[in-house]
């Protein structure tokens, strides 16, 4: 037995014993002065990170009695580097089984991740538990798979009610729907589009995912080994459509949720929907918004919009460049959407001007893949044994409080590697940033979900002047131009506001009411007290995948990685409630901001 | 370094040296007196097994000069059991890379499997070679994935011609089509049904696959971890449909191949097809029949069929039991189809009589899975590191000549385990067999593709008399009955001929002509000189996945396992011809039987 294994096993044995004996003092002492315990539903029935010994004490005082954890063990040989021992672990609770990652420093826990992965007695029917399919023997009342599927589809929402209604059938709603199907929780996904994947099909023609394939797998069924690194939008759309069918989801396309209200006495939502134009009332117990974590389009109120004679629209409604060949376009904004749209317009012989209103963080896609993601999500990672599942857990195990410290060196390396590129951009007048603390793209994504461009080529157009760049704020529109506050006048046939999105609780205001949206509060962000992510510190992403101040209302979304990984924890929370398992929530999030 | 590794590495080093020096004598001496070398396309551009030192000499004399193999090495630690050392190997040839399995006994080769897996310079775009998807940079002539797909679909078969035409779009055609797509060989699959998967959808409602999920994966994209063990027919149909789309196959549904002829001067086939009712001429270089290895329905000519007033049809056209509730059915035959149909009829309150004409081999599905397949294709196998790919290679490495020797003990174990079951069947008058030499189901499948039932419950109906059993031969039909040669008269409203299938070259006679069908000869079988598999010994399955006596005509099919594994070797043969790589065929099969 190696030294690291002995150390880890001793730590786990002692920790387990302390917890079984209810000896919180002893357990707390096993954590370092600086330490982080992140729990994904296993102890807290919440998504929460506690910090330091005081945090550990609070978590255990709030959860130990009901959690009753046992059976702590390593699942493979721990590794040791730079004085840190890292161990994959498993354990059980009173109601479920958990896994996680433990990092020891000087014999004390530095970081601990505990994550519920299944509920006892409700294990998923996969691998050795997969269904038989054929029903052997003879049976005069035999029904077939097809008949049962057709019967369910005919009844659910009409003569039977779903436990869960997911509003929004993009990748997030689909991933959660797949998990709930496996857990046997009756679920309907509603989406206004005609087919699964139309959320992607409807975007501009040259769009490809900015995240690579290894980062993007859905649950249960990985992309095939020949899948492109950056999936073209129509290809990912077709995949989502096939996935929805293969996973047997009750996916209602062409269905719009019109209004929703919650009845506290019955514990039911009343949701008015229109399916293929026919009104229908659904009464789910749980309501999940999977309407896009970016939330509602943010369209600034600009004077003169009514007199402008050309097209004006938000980037999310941009139809692509085809109609504007030979014309003049002004794109307001300088983040991902703005660059993608400027590039596509330029490729179609449009005269394009980008209006930069604030600084933007740019990283080259290649460098981001190599330096930012390569250790966890790449062919290299897979070859070295870092499966997507392991990568997800490693990523989840890094506490948000100190995550920027791990990120800063990576972005410093990118700045160095691509120095010429950045010099050219600055020379062209582009206003660059690397995040408030230099921590780059992921932190910007987690904190504010905006403020960056993953360059796949369009930055060069700005650097070399093919796309004209102007810095300033928009004052107003005239009949045929955009006027900036400094008086600069930009002739325009089309104006695109690539001005981002507001908090996702805007969807809640629309579907339910403003009061409920305010009670829910701001969605997304860490409370990092950096630009667009006001404090106080939350430690986790606000309101995502966990209980909120609004009963039986849940927010789900994020990129494909988050939709895949966190859908597991949201699905387990919903399953537990469906089965009547006690789910005492530790440290329910407070609301500090309404938008 | 362990003993087995040393032994194996020494053997491989010496073998490699002998081959590089062209020292066939020395190489031959490295094989045991009893030995088998199976080559899948790597040396022979054929699928061939040679036996003993004479066989090895012949293969090397015929192939060494052009193959020029090098770089023999083990890819993992060899294992040793019962005096046999087993090693996974890789090697290169002049044009490709190969892998295989070597078994050493007393320091000599006992079995050697060599298999081509890729052609140099034509590696599949998978894993680290996967396409980028996004085209980075800016490009005013940029086309999108969707536009390229739509353009290809519009042109192929009209303004451009496919290299390969696959007739038949079941799992075999689809698996081959997927591999050819990855290899960049322009291919069209034609199928008369309306949608991929309709080949399954159209069968009787309660049908499920008889083979388990681990045995059934398609190339590139495995079934998800929650897939049923025995897939219901409509579920596998939906999967095939999704797979066809995800793999971007040029799949022409609603298309019938009407006639085909080969022009030796142009080296082209002329194939008349009707697509969605519109006639069209295709001119592929290669023509693949994937029309079902079972071949054409065998419908015996029975006097009185014309006077019989009820329904009479072959099992392949059986519509299911719904129309026959409360009526009398006579099912002629006692193999898989007969049992499945009898069971479904009985479940629907039909009075059913089975007419057994010859002995049948029955194994219980559970026992077959556990004893027959469990080591290679099961959750247990996967857990112990036997991936589907490894299982395929292990299975392929067992020489057909001695395969029955490995099989007999397994079937003896099944006979013992299920003794009561067999006793009850015999007591009910059922005529059982275990194959001519007791080698059971797989050998029957490989030799004749018939003569067995994998019991999923219907055998009990015969054992307990719920399904009536009569033994004998059919004499003729009357207006309302089936009359056997012994005079037994069986009243019937419907007669199902579950009488099996003729050789697949019947399809060739239909599409091309009888002369070509005769030149091709019998398809399937090993030449084992057992029932329905006449000698002489072939050593491989006749005409399957390899060059035939008819230029540029190929037969593809088999169960899902074979469709998956052998489509690789067929695809590589087609790719080599497409690229103009020399493919000297060693030991082209001779024709001994025309049907």
Image: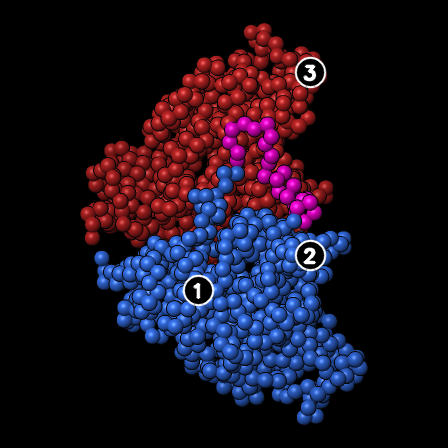
Chain colours: A blue, B red
Q: Is disc 2 in the same subunit as disc 3?
A: no
Residue drawn at x 62%, y 59% as measured from the top left: A287
Q: Which residue is mark 3?
A: B308
Q: Nearer the viewer, residue B134 or A115?
A: A115
* Residue neighbourhood size for the residue with mark 3, other residues' Cα within 10 Å, grouped as few (<14), some (14–19), many (≥20): many
**Element type where label 3 sits in the image:** loop
Closer-to-camera residue (B329/A532): A532
As drawn, the label of residue A270 is 2
Residue A156, compared with residue B258, is above or below; it is below
Circles 3 and 1, Cβ within 8 Å, touching? The answer is: no
Residue A115 x %, y %: 43, 60
Q: Mark 1 touching mark 2, by CB under 8 A?
A: no
Which numbered disc, 3 or 1, marks the residue closer to the eye? 1
User: In the figure, A354 relative to B340: above or below?
Assistant: below
Q: Residues within 10 Å of mark 1 (few under 14, many from 20)?
A: some
Camera-near label (1 vs 2) is: 1
Q: Is residue B402 left or right of residue B84?
A: right
Regarding residue A124, the answer to whether it shows in the image is yes
Mark-to-mark CA distance, 1 and 2: 34 Å
């Amino acid at each position: 037995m190696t030294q690291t294994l002995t150390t880890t096993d001793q730590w786990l044995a002692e920790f387990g014993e302390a917890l079984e004996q209810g000896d919180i003092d002893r357990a707390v002492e096993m954590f370092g002065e600086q330490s982080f315990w992140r729990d994904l539903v296993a102890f807290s029935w919440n998504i929460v990170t506690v910090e330091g010994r005081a945090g550990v004490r609070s978590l255990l005082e709030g959860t130990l009695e009901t959690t009753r954890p046992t059976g702590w063990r390593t699942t493979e040989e721990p590794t040791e580097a730079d004085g840190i021992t890292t161990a994959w672990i498993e354990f059980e609770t009173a109601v479920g089984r958990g896994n996680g990652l433990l990092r020891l420093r000087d014999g004390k826990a530095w970081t601990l991740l505990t994550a519920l992965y299944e509920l006892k007695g409700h294990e998923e029917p996969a691998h050795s538990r997969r269904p038989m399919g054929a029903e052997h023997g003879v049976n005069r009342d035999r029904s077939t798979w097809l008949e049962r599927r057709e019967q369910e589809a005919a009844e659910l929402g009409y003569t039977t009610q779903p436990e869960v209604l997911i509003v929004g059938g993009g990748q997030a709603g689909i991933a959660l729907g797949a998990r709930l199907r496996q857990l046997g929780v009756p679920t309907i996904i509603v989406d206004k589009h005609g087919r699964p994947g139309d959320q992607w099909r409807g975007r501009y023609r040259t769009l490809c995912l900015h995240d690579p394939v290894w980062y993007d797998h859905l649950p249960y069924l990985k992309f095939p080994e020949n899948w492109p690194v950056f999936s073209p939008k129509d290809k990912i759309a077709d995949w989502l459509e096939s996935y929805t069918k293969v996973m047997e989801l009750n996916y209602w396309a062409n269905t719009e949720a019109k209004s929703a209200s919650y009845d506290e006495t019955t514990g039911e939502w009343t949701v008015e929907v229109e399916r293929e134009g026919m009104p229908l009332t659904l009464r789910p117990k749980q309501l999940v918004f999977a309407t896009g974590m970016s939330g509602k389009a943010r369209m600034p109120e600009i004077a003169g919009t009514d007199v402008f004679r050309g097209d004006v629209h938000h980037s999310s409604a941009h139809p692509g460049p085809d109609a504007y060949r030979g014309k003049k376009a002004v794109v307001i904004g300088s983040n991902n959407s703005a660059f993608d749209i400027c590039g596509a317009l330029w490729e179609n012989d449009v005269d394009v001007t980008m209006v930069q209103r604030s600084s933007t963080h740019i990283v080259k896609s290649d460098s981001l893949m190599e330096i930012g993601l390569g250790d966890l999500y790449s062919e290299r990672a897979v070859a070295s044994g870092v499966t997507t599942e392991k990568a997800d857990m490693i990523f989840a195990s890094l506490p948000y409080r100190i995550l920027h410290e791990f990120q800063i060196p990576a972005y410093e390396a990118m700045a160095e590697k691509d120095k010429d590129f950045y010099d050219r951009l600055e020379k062209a007048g582009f206003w660059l940033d690397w995040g408030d603390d230099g921590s780059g793209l992921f932190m910007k994504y987690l904190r504010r979900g905006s403020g960056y461009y993953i360059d796949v080529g369009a930055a060069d157009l700005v650097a070399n002047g093919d796309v004209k760049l102007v810095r300033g704020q928009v004052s107003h529109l005239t009949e045929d131009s955009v006027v900036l506050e400094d008086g600069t006048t930009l002739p325009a046939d089309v104006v695109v506001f690539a001005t981002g999105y507001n908090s996702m609780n805007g969807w809640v205001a629309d579907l339910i009411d403003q009061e409920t949206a305010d009670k829910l509060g701001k969605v997304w962000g860490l409370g990092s007290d950096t630009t667009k992510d006001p404090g106080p510190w939350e430690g986790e992403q606000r309101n995502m995948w966990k209980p909120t101040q609004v009963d039986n209302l849940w927010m789900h979304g994020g990129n494909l990685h988050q939709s895949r990984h966190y859908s597991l924890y949201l699905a387990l929370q919903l399953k537990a409630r469906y089965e009547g398992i006690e789910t005492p929530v530790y440290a329910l999030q407070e609301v500090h901001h309404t938008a």
